[in-house]
Each structure stands twice: as structure tokens, then as C-alpha cells.
Amino acid sequence: MTMKPSRQVGIVGYGAYVPRYRLAAEEISQLWRGGQDRDTLPVREKSVPGPDEDSVSMSIEAARNALQRAQIDPTQLRAVWVGSESPPYAVKPTSTIVAQAIGAVPSTSAGDWEFACKAGSETMQAAIAMVGSSMADYAMGIGMDTAQGRPGDALEYTAAAGGAAFVFGPGEEALAVLEASYSYVTDTPDFFRRAHQHYPEHGNRFTGEPAYFHHVLSAGRHLMESLGLTAEDFALAVFHQPNVKFPQRAAQKLGFTAEQIRPGLLVGDIGNTYAGSSLIGLTGCLDAAQPGDRILMVSFGSGAGSDAFSFVVTEQLSKRRSLARTTQDYIARRQPVHYATYARWRSKLLLK
Amino acid sequence: MDIARHWRLRDQRYNLQGTVCAGCGHKMFPPRVVCPECRSRKIETFEFSGQGEVYSHTVVYQAPEGFDAYVPYVAALVRLEEGPLISAQLTDVNVDEVAIGLPVEMVTRKLTEQEENGLIVYGYKFRPRF
Ligand SMILES: [Zn+2]
């Protein structure tokens, strides 16, 4: 049930993007709850997109960073796929704008992928398949979101903006070679948004055990067992990050230490970037990894499902890592904003 | 501006695609069909690096229609490292941080939205290098 391409495939380039602005969870808490929940905030702060940013502009920058590290001509890409739950248009692909802006058009496939927060890792599975089948030498997968929570809702503390892009290519050119991947999905109504509604609904207590933990742990465990590996065989691991606690608990249940998840656990500083969450976590791992390191990545999307990947870092990573800005460079570029500015930019004055 | 015009300008807008003269090497933005330096018509497309510096700037408080979401913002003339001077909005910057000579780089951002049901126009802006 584990998936392996028929030729070796790996990540040949990766790039992150996080907007410049931050909103402190404490400020949201002050505004809506008088600071009553100050000691149990799910993140420290979250990233906020500027008034001229959306999933298109953010994908373009992450894609340009990935191409710089890949060192390929963008016309060599045969796919530009964007996974997001915040496309600027209801009808008109995000991916064609991104493909045009990075110079990949016209001889490429383009498409927008949907699966709540798993949309980004779906593009990775597909890009691996396209390169693995030799249909193409290079394919790009992106996970990017500008997530929205209803004002005052628990999701507003964490709903953030950011993500990452990956160029997949032949294993011999890779910074990190894929060992295998696995996908695990069931019909689970933990979180949803009907058409034409601005804000999503969550199935209350349903989000933890039957949704996030069941799928993340099942996917991670199955992939590790089928490869004959345990947590000790991995240098680093990254899990979908809706808050700080969930990925920490998932990691612990699979036998990982706090040290192994530290470089990829970014949610406390940038919030939950939805379809971008586990992908940008993986960029944090690649920024920190050494040749020979094995990295586990497990995504999660409501509805529900997880994709799990095992990568092994090659010698080429240290040579190409510095060709683009690191994920921490973006996290350090930080301008706090107040709720009023955030409300103006995000058109929060709309309450239904 | 109509949709067809936005469409024709997309490479220029998204990528700073201009032209270079095959005769004398003069680089032009926006693109031109005749070189203003040597009158040559041997013109090729050229993608600018996006690196430059602020040549002059002003803070806009009263924005033209379609730009009010961004006020106050900085409108600047940017000297590209390849030579041309272009006018553009600065982004990801506090208005009091801008000075002549500030090193900037091109980013592709939302320029304007034509009403709730209209086109979203993307194009170049510049932000401080970091
Ligand atoms: Zn000339």
C-alpha cells in the first residue's frame, strides 16, 4: 500500500514564503475574551498577509525561491500545481497566474488542488508520480494559504498565511531523495465550509482524536513500518501544525523527541498556514538537515486524510541551500500589527 | 483599463520583462521596438533582475480609484541596476523607512481589484531588500 515511483525521484528545489506582518494571539485574546485564555493560547503569534498579498502572489515568491535552488530553466517544468483553500478566484486557476509569472508557460500542466489543509501535499504526491513515471523530468507542487477564521472564533488565533513550493526531479539531481510515500483517507466531517460561506465550521470536539490524530498517526505509522523504520532512524520529522500541541503529541506518540521536530515546528511563530503548514515545516527541516539525514513528513487535511513521505538528504543540499532565502529569514522579517490594521486588511468588518 | 490590455502586459508586469538592443546593448523598460540610443530595430526581450534602488519617492494619501486599500503608500521612482528608471509602488515598508538610495527588489503583488466581481490585476512592486 506504500507508494514508490518506478524511478528515483526527489526534491531538487524548495522555497518558502511567509508574509511580513504578525498578529499576537494575546491581542486577539484581549479583544474577544478580556485575556481570560492568556495562559492557554494555541500559538504565540500568526503571520498576516499584507493588503496586496494573496495565495497567488505568495505562491509566486515561494516558486521563485524553489527555482533558484533547483537551478533549472522554468520552461523545463511540466506541471505547476497549487494546493490551497484560499484561491483568490472562485473560477480561474491560481496555477496559471503562477506558471506565467515564473516563466513556465505555455508547455506545462497547471491545476489547482483542493483537500482542505492536505491540498499542498496532494500536489507533492502527484508531482512525484509525474516524474516517477518519466512523463516529465520536473514538476512543481505548492501548498499556500491565507487562512481566515470568523472574528472571535477559536480559529482566528491560528488562521495564518504562508506556505512552500517544491520542484521534484530525477533522484540523481535531488537535494533529498524520496524513499516512499503513503496516503490515508476516510470520510470524516471534522471541518468544512459550504460554497459561498466566508468562514468554515468545525465539528467541535471532533477535530482531535477521530480526525487529526487518527489520520496523522495511521499514515505515519504505516509508512514507517512498511519501510522497516522507527523514529530513531529519522533525524527530523514534521507534522501538520494546526497549533503547537497537536504535532507535539503526534510526534511523541510515534516515538519522536522534541529535538527531532524542532526545526520544522514553526506554528508558534507563524500560525497555521493550512495547505502550506506541513510543507513549510519541511522547508524548515531542509534548511537544518545534513547529508544522510532521513526526514518524515505527515500532512493532514480535514475531511479527512494524511499524506506521509520519507526523504533522505543528499550531499547536494548543502551546495544549493544558500541559493535562496531560508524559512527563518522570512520568519525573522517581522512587523507586528494591531487587530485594527489586520481587520482593515482582511476585510474583517464583514461579520457573516 | 480593459482586460485585453492587462492580458497583453502580463509578462512585463509579472516579470519585469523589457527589451535589450542587439546593436548597442541598451536595456529598456517598458519594452520598445526601436532603440532610443542608436535607432536600431534589432530588439530582443530581456528580463530585468528586479534589483534596484529608490531614486525618488512620495507618500500617497489620496489614492486614485482602485488603490484606496493601500493608503498611505509610497510611490517611487526606482533605478534598476541595469539602468532604466521605473515608477512603482513600494510594499512591505513603513512610509517613514523610505529614503533615496534604499536598496529594493521586485516582487509580484496584487496591484488592484476591479470591483467585487472584476479582474484581480497582479504586477511588480518593490520592497526593501532583506
Ligand atoms: Zn541601441
Image (cartoon, coloured by chain):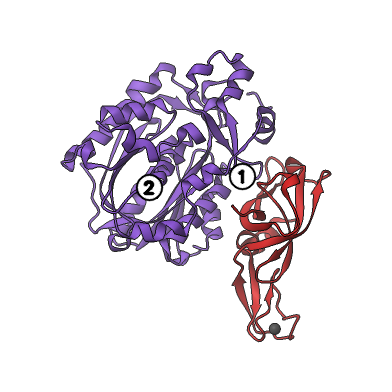
Residue A96 image offset from top left, x and y in percent = 52, 55
> Ligand 1 near label 2 (Cβ, under 8 Å)?
no
Q: Residues within 10 Å of mark 2 (few under 14, many from 20)?
A: some
Q: Amino acid at mark 2?
A: Ala
Between A185 and A12, the one nearer to me in the picture: A12
In the picture shown, does residue A43 fall above or below A142?
above
Seen as rendered, the residue at the extreme right is: B62
Which residue is painted at 46% across and 34% down in the image? A267
Specify whether residue A172 is in view. yes
Residue A32 image offset from top left, x and y in percent = 61, 17
Q: Which mark is residue A316?
A: none
Which residue is painted at 69% across and 61% down in the image? B53
Sequence order check, earlier mark of 1 and 2: 1
Specify whether residue A194 is in view. no
Seen as rendered, the residue at the extreme left is: A228
Between A265 and A144, the one nearer to me in the picture: A265
Quarter where residue A109 is shown: bottom left
Q: Amino acid at mark 1?
A: Glu
Which residue is painted at 62% across and 18% down in the image? A30
Q: Colour of chain B?
A: red
Residue A41 image offset from top left, x and y in percent = 50, 21
Host chain of mark 2: A
Secondary structure at badge 1 equals: loop
Residue A222 image offset from top left, x and y in percent = 22, 36
Q: Which chain is purple?
A: A
Which quadrant is the N terminus of chain A positioned in? Answer: top left
Quarter where residue A297 is shown: top left
In the picture shown, does residue A136 fall above or below A310?
below
In the picture shown, does residue A201 fall above or below A53?
above
